[in-house]
Amino acid sequence: MSADVLTRPGKKPSSRTPRVSAKAPKLLIAVSLLIGLVSHGWNMFRYPLYLTDEGIYMEQAWSVLKEAKLSPYTYFYDHAPMGWLALAGWVGILPGGFQAFGNAINTGRALMLIVHLASVFLMFETVRRFTASKPAAFLAVFVFNLSPLGVYYQRQVLLDNLMMFWILLGLYLLARRDGRIVTAMGAGACFGLALVTKENALFLLPGCAYLLHKTIREQSNRRFGLSFWWFAVLAPVTAYLLFAQIKNELFPEGLRFSPDNNQLKGHVSLLNTIWWQLHRNSNSSNGLSFTYLLQQSWLFKDRYILIGGVVATVLTLISGRRNRRLRTPMLACALMALGYAFYLSRSALLDFYIAPMVPLFALNLGMFFGWLTRRTNQGGAAVLVACLLVPVLVMPGGFLVKYNARGQLEFSDAYRLPLTQLQEQQVAWIKANIPTNARLIIDDDVWVALHDSNPPYKNAHPHYKATSDPDVRDKVFHSSWENVDYVVMSNKMRDALQRGGETWIIEAIDQHGQTVWQATRGDVSLSIVKIGNTS
C-alpha cells in the first residue's frame, strides 16, 4: 500500500452538502469577538464572587509551579489534571506570576476571557461551515456571549470552560471537512484532552463520535480517519491511567472499593474515586439535585437560554432527522446537549455544572436557525436575527438591564456589582492583623493569596482538608478547636461545613469563637472568627 493513501483527500462533497466559502466573514467575527470581550471582560475581576473551586484550581496550579506536584495536599484524583496544568502554563509565562492581574483568581479569569474569545471564533466557524449561514453563526455566538448564565460561569476559573474549549476546537476541525487524516486525529486529540480536563466530557462522546463517523464516511481513507480519531482520544486517557499505575494508585488497596472516598484505607486510588463519583447522588453531602438548582439558581440567572435552549435542542433533533443536507451536524449537536442533560439529571451537582449547557444550547440554536432559514436569503435571515435579539437586550430582566428596588432601570449585576472587593478586604485584614505562624482554617478562594505572600501563611488550610486529609486533620489540627487560632469564613461557608459534617469546626466557631472582622453586601457576608478568646 502506498503512503499517500493515508493523506489522500476524500471524495468531493455530495450535492446535498452546502457550499461554504472558505473565506470567513471577518467583520461579523470581529463584532462577535468585540461583544465577547466587553460582555465577559467588563467587571470580570469584581463579579461574580470568587468561588471555592476557582481557588482550588489556582492552588493546584500554584503547587505545579512551586512544588512540582499536582496538589499541595494529597492528590486523590478528584479530577484529571489537564485543566490546572494549563493554568500553570498560563501563569508561568506571565511576568508577574500569580499576581499579574492583582491576585491568583484574577489571573486565572484573564485566561478564561482568552478561552472564551477563542471559543467564540470556533463556534462561529463551526455553525457557519455546517449551515452555510452567517446569520445563524452570529445568532449562536451572540447568545453565547451575552447569556447571563454564560457570563456568570464563563468568567470563573472552571474546568468546565476549558473542557468546552477543547470540544469546540474538535467540532471546528471536523467542520472543515478537508478529508485529511491529521484533521481527524487532531479532533480526536481535542476530545481526549477534554476528557482529561474534566471527565464529564464523556457524556458528549456519542454526539462527537456520530459526527465523526458521518462526516468521513464518504472519504476513501475513512477507516484510517476513524482509527486515528479513537487513538488520539484514548492517548491522553491512557497516559492518565498509566500515571496512576506508576504511582501504584490505580486500584484501591486489596481491591476494596468504598463509596465513601474519605474512608478509603491505605493509599488513594483513581478507580475508587471513579467508584465514589458514580455513587454520589443529590442526597449526599457533596451535591444538590437538578430540580433544586434549576428552581433556586439557574432559572433565576437566565430563563431565556434554558427554555429556549431546550426548545431549540428538541426542534434540532426533530428537524435534523427530516433533512438529509444538515442531518449529521444537527443530530450531533442535539445528541451532545441531550447527553450532558442526562448527566445533569442523574448526578449530584454543584451550581456551576450547568456551564457547558450554554455553548451546547447556543450550538443547537444556531443549527436550528440555519435549517429554518435554509431557503431564505442572508439579508432576510439577518433581519430575523435582529428581531429575535433586540427584545432580550432592551427588555427589563433580559440580558443587559433590570429594574432595581426603586423601580429604576440599571445594568445587570454582572456589569456593575463589585463583590470581590469584600474578599480582597478580608485578605488585607488578615495580612495586617494576624501573624504568619497562626493556624487558620480557610476556604480555598484565599489560599494562594495567603501562601504566595512573603512571608507565607503556611498553617492556613481549607476546611475540607482540615476534616478529611489525614496530613492536615491529624498532624496540624488534631480535630480539636484548641489547635485553631482563626477561622476565615467565606460566603455560605457555614452551609458547606454543615453539609460536610465538619462538626468540630462548627463547635470551634459557636462555642469558642469571637468575630473580629465582618463585611456584608446584600446577601454576601464574610467574617473572621478568632478561636479561644470569647471574652
Image: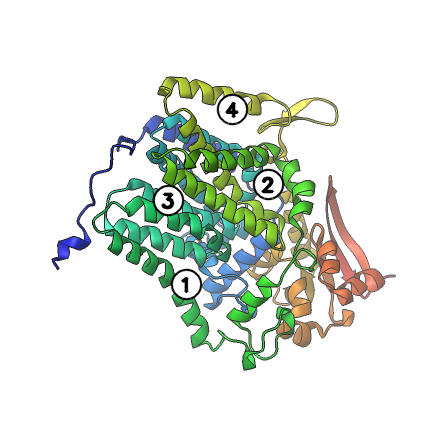
Mark 3 secondary-structure assignment:
helix
- Please tell me which residue lies in front, 468 or 431: 468
Of marks 1 and 3, which one's residue comes earlier in the chain? 3
Q: CA distance from mark 2 to mark 1?
A: 36 Å
**Vertical placement of 20 versus 498: above or below?**
above
Of marks 4 and 1, which one's residue comes earlier in the chain? 1
Q: Which residue is mark 2?
A: 46
- Please tell me which residue lies in front, 401 or 50: 401
- Residue drawn 51% across the image and 55% down it: 200
Q: Which residue is mark 1?
A: 237
Q: Disc 3 or disc 2, which is closer to the eye?
A: 3
Residue 481 screen position, x and y as percent: 77, 69
- Please tell me which residue lies in front, 148 or 213: 213
Mark 3: few/some/many CA within 10 Å (<14, 14-19, 20+): many
Residue 420 screen position, x and y as percent: 63, 44
Q: Which residue is mark 4?
A: 389
Considering every residue shown, the one lying at the far front of the view is 322
Mark 2 secondary-structure assignment:
loop
Looking at the image, residue 341 sits to the left or right of residue 7; the answer is: right
Indicate the amino acid at tag 1.
Val
- Residue 171 badge: 3
Of marks 3 and 2, which one's residue comes earlier in the chain? 2
- Residue drawn 62% across the image and 31% down it: 412
Q: CA distance from mark 4 to mark 3?
A: 25 Å
Indicate the amino acid at tag 2.
Arg
